[in-house]
Image: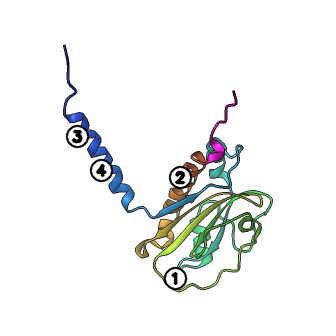
Amino acid sequence: MKTSAPATRPTLLMACALAAATLLAGCHATTDARWTTANDTVYRWEHALPTLPVEVRGQLPNVSHAQMAQAIPRALPARQPADPTAARLVVDAGSELAPANDAYCAATAPTPAATTSRTPLALTLALCDGTRLVASSRSQVASGRNNVDDLPRQIDHLKNLMLIGIDESPAQYVHIQG
């Protein structure tokens, strides 16, 4: 006796696909994990991220560097430079360029300068293991959300994207030789 699957199953799958597409349509974020190695596992970094110091670079419009550092958990004060040999996160507000290589982590944070309000503003999160760039994620910040109150949520979002990028990086594929 043949039984047929109820018609609601394909409808449910289509509804889920449509909902996912709708949620992702407004997402203007990028993740780059091309620098990861086999030792850069999601397990390692997921447990380390909450304890890493955060170096703050750049500035949001109409917000001081000190206000940004105060709003971000584990942020280093502007007068305290990050240890370039230690693992850390780098939050960069307003930079035109995304991190491109290890020089990004080896460089010291530039002195904060006044920024003019421009739209869209980019927020970049980079994971540095000493002077080695591990991964980065970058998102455009809407003009109505470029205040200090939204920073922790935006940074958590970028952390999650970065972990997804690390997990899907080619360095994480298991190579079996037979």
Q: Secondary structure at mark 4?
A: helix
Residue most extreme to the front: 178
| Rendered location of residue 175, percent (x, y) | 67, 36
Please name the amino acid that badge 1 sits on.
Asn
Q: Are marks 3 and 4 in contact (CB under 8 Å)?
A: no
Residue kind at label 2, given as amino acid type: Asn
Q: Which residue is mark 2?
A: 160
Q: Residue at x 68, y 55 (%)?
A: 35
Question: Which amino acid type corresponds to the residue marked 3 in the rendered image?
Answer: Thr
Q: Is residue 105 magenta?
A: no
Pick the residue in front: 72 or 128: 128
Gap in Å between the C-alphas at discs 2 and 4? 22 Å
- Inter-mark Cα distance, 1 to 4: 38 Å
Residue 58 falls in which quadrant of the image? bottom right
> Earlier along the polypeptide chain: callout 1 or callout 4?
4
Q: Earlier in the sequence, mark 3 or mark 1?
A: 3
> What segment carries the magenta color?
170-177
Residue 153 in the image: x percent, y percent? 49, 60
> Pointer 3: residues within 10 angstroms few (<14), some, or many (20+)?
few
**Which of pointers 1 and 2 lies earlier in the amino acid sequence?**
1
- Marking on residue 11: 3
Labels 1 & 2 near each other (Cβ < 8 A): no
Residues tagged 2 and 3 counted as in contact (Cβ below 8 A): no
The residue tagged with tag 3: helix, strand or loop?
Answer: helix
- Residue extending furthest toward the right: 85
**Residue 74 location, x and y as percent?**
64, 60
Q: Nearer the viewer, mark 2 or mark 3?
A: 3
The residue that disc 1 covers is: 62
Name which quarter of the figure residue 15 lies in.
top left
